[in-house]
Each structure stands twice: as structure tokens, then as C-alpha cells.
Amino acid sequence: MRKPVIAGNWKMFKTVEEAVAFVDALVPLVESSAHCEVVVAPPFPALSSVAQRVKATNIGVSAQDCHWEKEGAFTGEVSCEMIKEAGASHVIIGHSERRQFFGETNETVNKKIFAALRAFLVPIVCVGESLAEREKNETERVVGEQMTKGLDSLTELQLSHIIVAYEPVWAIGTGRTATPELAAETHRFIRDTVAKLFSRSSSAAIRILYGGSVKPDNIKGLMAQPDIDGALVGGASLKPDSFAAIVNF
Ligand code: PGA
């Protein structure tokens, strides 16, 4: 049984004050939502305050990125150990915005996954093709390579702590969601890839979230697909009501 995960990626939104007000409003809306894991990913400055605030609740806290070293002369970077100490439980790795604007590669994704596991954080590893790649029929090649290189050298035990998020880049922030069937096709491909790289049992156990314009009105259709195990939500995760509506699909 794969327990669904609904994670909100706030990106570069919300001050500390706004973040705390958000979780205070969210807690009562999702406190009886035992059917899934709920995670919010605030920007770094709000991590610790949000983590304090949700301590005794069913809400987990995620960072949006990390560095792979424990510490060092890496101006502007934050290590997994620091994220863990701030009270977070998860870290998003390889988001397409990091890949597109900040030089994230499959190789750095791989290093960051090992760093997250070292700090006992759950990595939420993002994969997905661009519009040009989808139109050239390259979805499986691109996503396959992101999976193979990103998950390189992991043991099955390490893999069992990982969550994958499939986010077609053309569906992020565009209002253009992949249809549940289209998303499910790639989710199946990802699950098959895990079976090839690791084993059938790892493939059956791994949770694969969908991301890209997930909203209260399309979550149900997505969750009806057997290979979709939850969602990574951007825009619609910024308001407690809409995020709670997605959690309580
Ligand atoms: P979106 O973002 O829901 O606003 O499309 C998803 C994401 O980038 O994780």
C-alpha cells in the first residue's frame, strides 16, 4: 500500500510571518486527513518557524533545494544537516526551475540525494520533460535519463526512502495540466524504469507524485490513476483553502 503524499511547493513566496499564518490556518483543515501525508515547502528563512508551528501535527516540512556537502566555503548554499536541524523532514531535489535557471544537472541531483539520505531527510526527486522534448517524442528518453543518472549507485534500501515527482515542465504554472491518462502513461514508464534499475518490489513500493497545475478541480481525476500517488502543488498550495481541498481530494 502506497500512502499518498500531497506536497505544497511555495517557491519564492511568503515571508516568515505569512508562512506561519498559513500553517496556522491549514492545521485545522487537514488535521483529520489521515489518508495521506501532507508536506509544505517554505523558502529557507521560514523553515524553522514553520517546523516549530507544525511540530505536533500531521504536516511535514520540506526545503526546496540543498547542497550536497555538510558544510564549507559555498556562499549562499544550505546543507541537508542545516535543513534537518531547522526541523524539516523532506527536501525537494532537481525541480525543473533549478535545472532551468540554476544549473542543476542529473549529476548534482544524484549528489544531493545522497546528502539528503545522510541527513535523514526524505528526498522528493523531480523529473520531467520540456514542451520541445514532448513534441519531439523524447519524454521517455529524457525522463529515463533523469531517473537513471539521478538514482545512480543507490541501494534498494536507499531508494525505499525516496519520493519521485513527475512534473512535465510545460504543465508547471501554465494552467495546462497533463490529462490524467497522459500523466499516468509517464508514471507507468517511471515505475517500469525503477523495476529495471532496481527490482519489481521497489517499483511497486515507490511513490510517484504528479506536479504541474494541480488544482482542487483536477486532483480527483489524477488520484484516480493507479500509478499516481499524490501531487506536488505549486500555485494552488499558496492558499490554505485550495491546498486543503487538494489534500482532502
Ligand atoms: P504549479 O507548480 O502547480 O504552479 O504548476 C508545480 C511545481 O512547480 O512544483
Image (cartoon, rainbow, N blue to C red):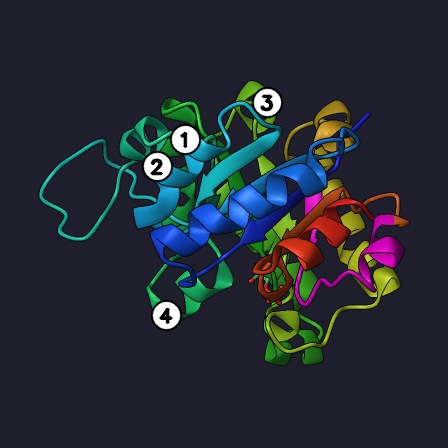
Amino acid type indicated by mark 3 = Glu
Q: Position of residue 32 (x, y in %)?
A: 75, 31
The nearer-to-camera label among 1 and 4 is: 1
Instruction: Please state which of residues 219 and 33 is positioned toward the viewer in this rendering.
Output: 33
Quadrant where the N terminus lies? Answer: top right
Amino acid type indicated by mark 1 = Gln
Residue at point 74%, 42% (across, down): 191
Mark 2: few/some/many CA within 10 Å (<14, 14-19, 20+): some
* Quadrant location, ligand no. 1: bottom right
- Which residue matches tag 1? 52
Instruction: Indicate whether 107 appears above or below 12.
Output: above
Instruction: Please state which of residues 233 and 33 is positioned toward the viewer in this rendering.
Output: 33
Q: CA distance from mark 1 to mark 4?
A: 31 Å
- For the residue labelled by badge 2, is the local secondary structure a helix, a strand or a loop? helix
Amino acid type indicated by mark 4 = Phe
Q: CA distance from mark 4 to mark 3?
A: 31 Å
Q: Which mark is residue 156?
A: 3
The earlier-in-sequence mark between 1 and 3 is 1
